[in-house]
Image: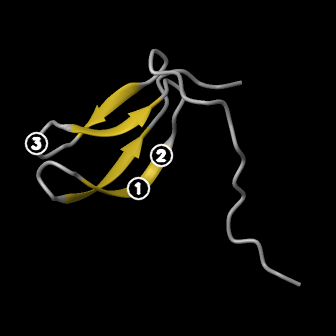
Amino acid sequence: MQKVLYNITRGDILNPSRFIWYPCPKCGGKLLAINSDTEVKKLPCKCKHCKRESLITIVPMIKAD
Protein backbone atom coordinates (compact mmCIF):
# COMPACT_ATOMS: atom_id res chain seq x y z
CA MET A 1 0.00 0.00 0.00
CA GLN A 2 1.38 3.38 -1.00
CA LYS A 3 1.55 6.22 1.45
CA VAL A 4 0.01 9.48 0.18
CA LEU A 5 2.35 12.39 0.80
CA TYR A 6 0.26 15.21 -0.62
CA ASN A 7 -3.41 15.77 -1.31
CA ILE A 8 -3.42 17.82 -4.51
CA THR A 9 -6.68 19.06 -5.96
CA ARG A 10 -7.00 20.95 -9.19
CA GLY A 11 -8.91 24.19 -8.89
CA ASP A 12 -10.11 26.87 -11.25
CA ILE A 13 -7.85 28.32 -13.91
CA LEU A 14 -6.26 31.52 -12.65
CA ASN A 15 -7.94 34.66 -13.87
CA PRO A 16 -5.39 37.52 -13.97
CA SER A 17 -7.96 40.01 -12.67
CA ARG A 18 -8.60 37.88 -9.54
CA PHE A 19 -5.11 37.64 -8.08
CA ILE A 20 -2.53 40.06 -6.74
CA TRP A 21 1.26 39.78 -6.62
CA TYR A 22 2.95 39.22 -3.27
CA PRO A 23 6.17 41.28 -3.28
CA CYS A 24 9.63 40.01 -2.40
CA PRO A 25 10.47 41.15 1.15
CA LYS A 26 14.04 41.99 0.09
CA CYS A 27 13.75 43.83 -3.27
CA GLY A 28 9.99 44.41 -3.73
CA GLY A 29 9.75 42.55 -7.06
CA LYS A 30 6.89 40.23 -8.00
CA LEU A 31 7.36 36.98 -6.10
CA LEU A 32 4.10 35.02 -5.85
CA ALA A 33 0.60 35.35 -7.35
CA ILE A 34 -2.07 35.00 -4.66
CA ASN A 35 -5.85 35.27 -4.32
CA SER A 36 -7.58 37.12 -1.51
CA ASP A 37 -8.23 33.83 0.33
CA THR A 38 -4.73 32.34 -0.05
CA GLU A 39 -3.16 30.96 3.13
CA VAL A 40 0.53 30.00 3.22
CA LYS A 41 2.71 29.06 6.18
CA LYS A 42 6.52 28.99 6.00
CA LEU A 43 6.78 28.58 2.21
CA PRO A 44 10.40 28.82 1.01
CA CYS A 45 10.60 31.10 -2.04
CA LYS A 46 13.53 32.29 -4.13
CA CYS A 47 13.19 35.64 -5.87
CA LYS A 48 13.99 35.64 -9.59
CA HIS A 49 15.18 39.24 -9.40
CA CYS A 50 17.50 39.43 -6.37
CA LYS A 51 18.20 35.64 -6.04
CA ARG A 52 17.57 35.68 -2.28
CA GLU A 53 15.58 33.05 -0.42
CA SER A 54 12.97 33.82 2.23
CA LEU A 55 10.19 32.07 4.13
CA ILE A 56 6.75 33.42 3.24
CA THR A 57 3.75 33.37 5.59
CA ILE A 58 0.45 34.75 4.27
CA VAL A 59 -2.83 34.93 6.17
CA PRO A 60 -6.03 35.38 4.14
CA MET A 61 -7.55 38.85 3.86
CA ILE A 62 -11.02 37.27 3.63
CA LYS A 63 -11.91 34.13 5.55
CA ALA A 64 -13.27 31.41 3.26
CA ASP A 65 -16.39 29.66 4.47
Query: Label 1, label 3: how many angstroms apart (C-alpha)?
Result: 18 Å
Q: Nearer the viewer, mark 2 or mark 3?
A: 3
Give the amino acid type for the residue marked by disc 2 in the picture: Val
Protein image colouring: secondary structure
Residue on which disc 2 sits:
40
Q: Earlier in the sequence, mark 2 or mark 3?
A: 3
Percent of width and height locating residue 2 = 82, 81
Query: Label 2, label 1: how many angstroms apart (C-alpha)?
Result: 6 Å
Percent of width and height locating residue 28 = 15, 36
Q: In front here: 60 or 20?
A: 20
Quadrant where the N terminus is found in the figure? bottom right
Residue 46, quarter of picture = bottom left
Percent of width and height locating residue 53 = 22, 60
**Residue 54 relative to residue 10: left or right:** left
Residue 21, quarter of picture = top left
Going 51% across and 34% down the picture, which residue do you hit?
Answer: 38
**Above/below status of 49 relative to 19:** below
**Above/below status of 47 relative to 18:** below
Percent of width and height locating residue 36 = 49, 23
Give the amino acid type for the residue marked by disc 1 in the picture: Leu
Going 49% across and 18% down the picture, which residue do you hit?
Answer: 18
Residue on which disc 1 sits:
43
Give the amino acid type for the residue marked by disc 3 in the picture: Cys
Residue on which disc 3 sits:
27
Task: Sort mark 3 into few (<14), some (14-19) or many (20+) by Cα contacts within 10 Å.
Answer: few
Quadrant where the C terminus is found in the figure? top right
Is the residue under label 1 in contact with that under label 2 (CB below 8 Å)?
Answer: yes
Q: Earlier in the sequence, mark 1 or mark 3?
A: 3
Task: Sort mark 1 into few (<14), some (14-19) or many (20+) by Cα contacts within 10 Å.
Answer: few
**Above/below status of 63 relative to 42:** above
Query: Label 2, label 3: how many angstroms apart (C-alpha)?
Result: 20 Å
